[in-house]
Amino acid sequence: MTKISVEVPEELLADLDAHVGEDGKFVNRSEAVRASIRKTLDQLDEIDQRQGRIDDE
C-alpha cells in the first residue's frame, strides 16, 4: 500500500482521534482517513452522476 503524508490542523486531528481507538469507530488513524476518502469520493461520484458528468457504461 502506498504511503502519503499530509498536514492536518490540530483541531481536525483532535476530532479524528475522538473516533479512533477502543471506544471509537476506527482502530487507527489510517483506517479513519481511508474511510473518509472513500465516502467523500462516493459522494462526489453521486454528484457527478446527477449532474450528467459520468456515463453509466
Image (cartoon, grey):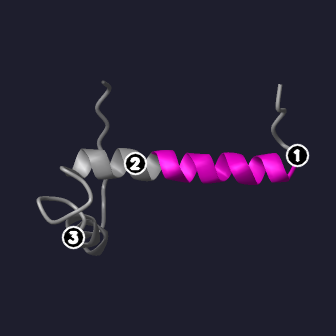
- Residue 6 vs 10, above or below: the answer is above
Give the mark, 3 or 1, whose residue is nearer the N terminus: 3
| Residue 17, numbered label | none
| Residue 35, numbered label | 2
Give the mark, 2 or 1, whose residue is nearer the N terminus: 2
Determine the CA span between mark 3 and mark 2.
15 Å
Crowd around label 1: few <14 · some 14–19 · many ≥20 (10 Å): few
Callout 2 amino acid: Ala
The main secondary structure of the magenta stretch is helix
Determine the CA span between mark 3 and mark 1.
38 Å
Crowd around label 3: few <14 · some 14–19 · many ≥20 (10 Å): few
Callout 3 amino acid: Ala
Let me know if residue 50 is in the magenta part. yes
Residue extending farthest to the right is: 52
Residue 41 position within the rendered picture, expressed as x and y whole percent measured from the top left: 57, 46
| Residue 52, numbered label | 1
Locate residue 34 relative to residue 27 in the image: left or right.
right
> Do the residues bearing badges 3 and 2 touch, measured as CB atoms within 8 Å?
no
Please give the range of residues in magenta.
Answer: 38-52
Q: Is mark 1 on a helix, strand or loop?
A: loop
Nearest the viewer among 11 and 49 is 49
| Residue 18, numbered label | 3
Residue 20 position within the rendered picture, expressed as x and y whole percent measured from the top left: 20, 60
Residue extending farthest to the bottom is: 11
Let me know if residue 21 is in the magenta part. no
Q: What element carries label 2?
A: helix
Q: What residue is drawn where x is 77% and y is 48%?
A: 48
Determine the CA span between mark 2 and mark 1.
26 Å
Callout 1 amino acid: Gly
Nearest the viewer among 14 and 45 is 45
